[in-house]
Amino acid sequence: MKYFIKFLFLFYGLVAFGQNQTYTFAAFGSYKRNDNVLLQSFVNRENFDYFIFVKKNDSNKMIGLLYDFKNKYVHHLDIVEKDSVFSFLYKHSHKLNNYTKPEKFVTVEKNYSKLSIKEFQNKKRKKVIYEVNAVVENSDINNFRIFQVCCLHPNEMNKNFNYSNENITVINAEIKSYTNNVSIYKLQSVKNVDLKIEISQINLKR
């Protein structure tokens, strides 16, 4: 599953007289949920502090939400895709307030092509409150981070939900949510990318 894609980043109000905030991304991937919702994201496989979640707005236009949990910002981007080229246009930013990482009691186990993630109610680990059962394949590079960002909301940033022991790609998964709803996710695409986005500090002070 090796693909490469070109990117064009359109600067809008991003010329800074100070230090810019720089984000780099090495992978783009997508999963489709059983209600036909397409979930897409750009990730840095090594850095859990940020990611871009891609979705369509009410006008059916593609937008990106760049979540920066370290600096507590969400950057809004317009995205245009044409001939496998993505163009990004910065719109605005807002503060990400009151975000905390609650304590989680999680087990992650892999048995051949099966991967299981269970979150328990407390440290006694008796009652399961969130569960993931996935089918995985070995890959040249670990693509689990893409699955985590696309499908494991609200646990995108929690390293307890990550699997880094081997290079794998999640092909499909059944997830039982905190409200006992069950959803099915199927892999649509995984692409290696070379993307850098810089946000001017001037924009963050507006």
Image (tube, grey):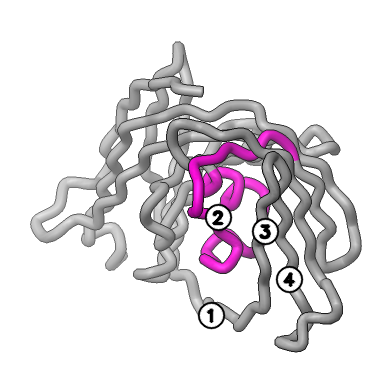
Q: Secondary structure at mark 4?
A: strand
Residue with the mark numbered 3: 109
At a point 73% along the width and 55% down the height, the residue shown is 116
> What residue sits 28% from the left and 40% below the top?
196
| Residue sitting farthest toward the top | 83
Asked whether the beta carbons under mark 1 and mark 2 sit within 8 Å of each other, the answer is no
Where disc 3 sits, the SS reads: strand
Residue type of the residue flagged with mark 3: Glu
How dense is the environment of label 1, judged by Cα within 10 Å: few (below 14), some, or many (20 and up)? few
Q: Amino acid at mark 4?
A: Glu
Is 179 left, or right, of 99 in this rendering?
Answer: right
Residue occupied by mark 1: 100
Kindly report which numbered mark, 4 or 3, lies closer to the viewer in this rendering.
3
Mark number, residue 119:
4
Q: State if disc 2 and disc 4 touch (CB < 8 Å).
A: no
**Residue 195 screen position, x and y as percent:** 32, 36
From mark 2 to mark 3, how far is it between C-alphas?
Answer: 9 Å
- 80 in relation to 176, above or below: above
**Residue placed under numbered mark 2 in the picture:** 163
Q: Callout 4: few (<14), some (14-19), or many (20+) C-alpha neighbours within 10 Å? A: many
Q: Nearer the viewer, mark 1 or mark 3?
A: 3
Q: At label 1, which amino acid type do we have?
A: Thr
Query: Is label 1 in a helix, a strand or a loop?
Result: loop
Work out which residue is located at the far left of the displayed protein and give it: 17
Q: Position of 182 compared to 143: left or right?
A: right
The span picked out in magenta is: 144-172
Label 3: how many Cα within 10 Å (few below 14, some 14–19, many 20+): few
Q: Position of residue 194 (x, y in %)?
A: 31, 32
Q: Quadrant of residue 61?
A: top right
Q: Is residue 53 visible?
A: no
